[in-house]
Amino acid sequence: MHKTRSVQIEHKKHGHNINFNAMASPCEVIIQTQNKSLAKKVAQCVSNEVWRIEDKYSRYDSLSICGQINSSEGQKNAIDEETYLLLNFAEQCYQLSDGLFDITSGVLRKVWAFDSLSGECKNFPSATEVKKQAKLVDWTKVIYDQQSITLPQYMELDFGGIGKEYAVDRCILLAKLLTDEPILVNLGGDIAVTGPRHNKQAWQVAIENPESDVLDQPQDMVVALKQGALATSGDSRRYLMKDGVRYGHVLNAKTGWPIIDAPRSITAVAPQCIQAGILATLALLQGEYAEQFLTEQEVIYWARR
């Protein structure tokens, strides 16, 4: 299937802004340079890398490695080193979360549809439907090594919980190979920087308030970022309302049901974006104990309830 993709480069006072769309998100790269040729090189390098990762690991693309694994019907599939390392990271996340984070939980989307920005609930699943689908969630049944993976029939992998953050880190790595100029990469709110801006100034990064559409609520919060990355996880845009109860899109892999009593959003800071993203997600999976989890991990974070 042909995909129409484009990149816009805009000259600004501080340098150049690069914009494109990927992974169902608006993506932005800011580079502090007046060199238009360099900005074009960075734009091409970064956008191509993000699209490469999207094409390789999208669960919606039958030609992707993820699509091939999910349609293998229990047969062995060959994998490369990059996929093996991502599976290893998923294994670590599974262990750290005591099974709450499980990349085989993507099958739950067959009963949970968080596709309404208003939270409108058209097809709320029954307990029987959720239980039936949850039986297909079990990372321990996945067998893999450096050369191959075997996924039991009817089970599916979903790299969505780590893919975008991984792409941010890859972009930062490649950008550093091209230039020493300060660069910020923002893929749908998952953000990393190559270092401070010129004159050692911090980047000013806005964190969206999940209640910012309510008039009496404060607007987005701005934080200073000189190095490393930050990522946000929450239900401000993906949730369901049923009988006055709000169900966020972050699901408990053990039960198949949304996590209860978690903050509306959590933003975590870490040296790499994939670390920040998983910390924010693991915290949400703790429900009412989210902040306690992050404090125990000595993580810099912001939580909004």
Image (tube, rainbow, N blue to C red):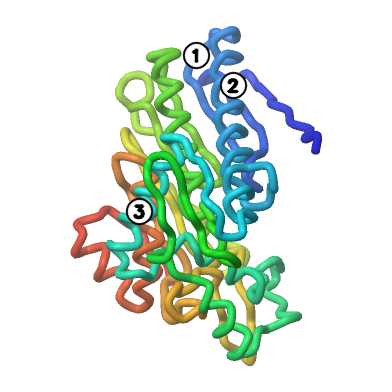
Q: Residue furthest front?
A: 75
Residue type at numbered disc 3: Ala
Q: Is residue 86 left or right of residue 136?
A: left
| Location of mark 2 (residue) | 43
- 1 or 3: mark nearer the eye: 3
Residue 221 place in picture, x, y as percent: 45, 53
Q: Residues within 10 Å of mark 2 (few under 14, many from 20)?
A: many
The answer for how far apart the CA atoms under marks 1 and 2 are is 13 Å
Residue at the image position 30 percent from the left and 70 percent from the top: 98
| Location of mark 1 (residue) | 33
The answer for how far apart the CA atoms under marks 2 and 3 are is 27 Å
| Quadrant holding the C terminus | bottom left
Residue 68 place in picture, x, y as percent: 62, 48
- 1 or 2: mark nearer the eye: 2
Assign a secondary structure to mark 1: loop
Q: Nearer the viewer, residue 72 or 83?
A: 72
Q: Name which quarter of the figure residue 191 lies in.
A: top left
| Location of mark 3 (residue) | 268
Residue at the image position 46 percent from the left and 50 percent from the top: 149
Residue 39 place in picture, x, y as percent: 56, 15
Residue 171 place in picture, x, y as percent: 47, 29
Residue 118 seen from this side: yes
Q: Earlier in the sequence, mark 1 or mark 2?
A: 1
Q: Residues within 10 Å of mark 3 (few under 14, many from 20)?
A: many
The answer for how far apart the CA atoms under marks 1 and 3 are is 28 Å
178 versus 50 height, above or below: above
Residue type at numbered disc 1: Thr
Residue type at numbered disc 2: Ala
Assign a secondary structure to mark 2: helix
